[in-house]
Image: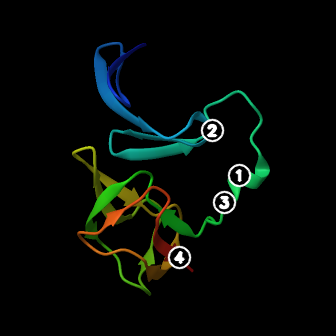
Amino acid sequence: MTVTRVGDGVYRVEIEQESALVYVAGPATDRWVFCDGRVYRGDFTDAPRDPRRASRGHGAQTLVAPMPATVLKVLVVAGQPVKKGDPVVVLEAMKMELPMRAGGDATVGAVRCREGELVDADTILVEFD
């Protein structure tokens, strides 16, 4: 595997004969990674994670913006059931479309964003019941 920095927060990862651009944002203890249409969030340090930081006010029942972005599409309404992996909101960040997907089976409790809105990182987009 070869990783090459191609810009601020942008890396090319090559494995055998395949390559992908990977976008990275946030501090090492709360890193957001966007690759191949998926978003990953985690603590990429070797230090033990502070459990108080893990519960920063967003429970498992919310969908938050991983980085500053523009809301392109809202694909759900309050009361709508969703399955794990269903697209819920599409964001645009760093000239890339970023589909935000449901983390599990749930019912949409409230939509907290609207199309065209600029949102900051950690803005709650959708709440689930």
Residue 29, disc: 2
Q: How is the image coloured?
A: rainbow
Give the residue at mark 1: 53
**Proximity of marks 1 and 2: CB atoms separated by less than 8 Å:** yes
Work out whether 29 lies above or below 77.
above
- Tally the marks: 4
Question: Badge 2 local density, few (<14 within 10 Å), some, or many (20+)?
Answer: some
Give the residue type that dot 2 points to: Thr
What is the quadrant of the N terminus in the image?
Answer: top left
Q: Quadrant of residue 72?
A: bottom left
**Residue 17 point in image, percent of width and height:** 29, 14
71 sits left or right of 57 in the view: left
Among the two numbered marks 2 and 4 on one chain, the one whose residue lies closer to the N terminus: 2
Helix or strand or loop: what does disc 3 sit on?
Answer: loop
Question: Badge 1 local density, few (<14 within 10 Å), some, or many (20+)?
Answer: few
Give the residue type that dot 3 points to: Arg
Give the residue at mark 3: 56
Q: Tell me the distance, in whole angstroms, between the alpha carbons under discs 1 and 2.
A: 10 Å
- Residue at left offset 49%, top offset 44%: 40
Disc 2 vs disc 4: which is toward the camera? 2
Q: Residue furthest bottom?
A: 79
Question: Badge 4 local density, few (<14 within 10 Å), some, or many (20+)?
Answer: many
Among the two numbered marks 3 and 2 on one chain, the one whose residue lies closer to the N terminus: 2
Give the residue type that dot 4 points to: Phe
Give the residue at mark 4: 128
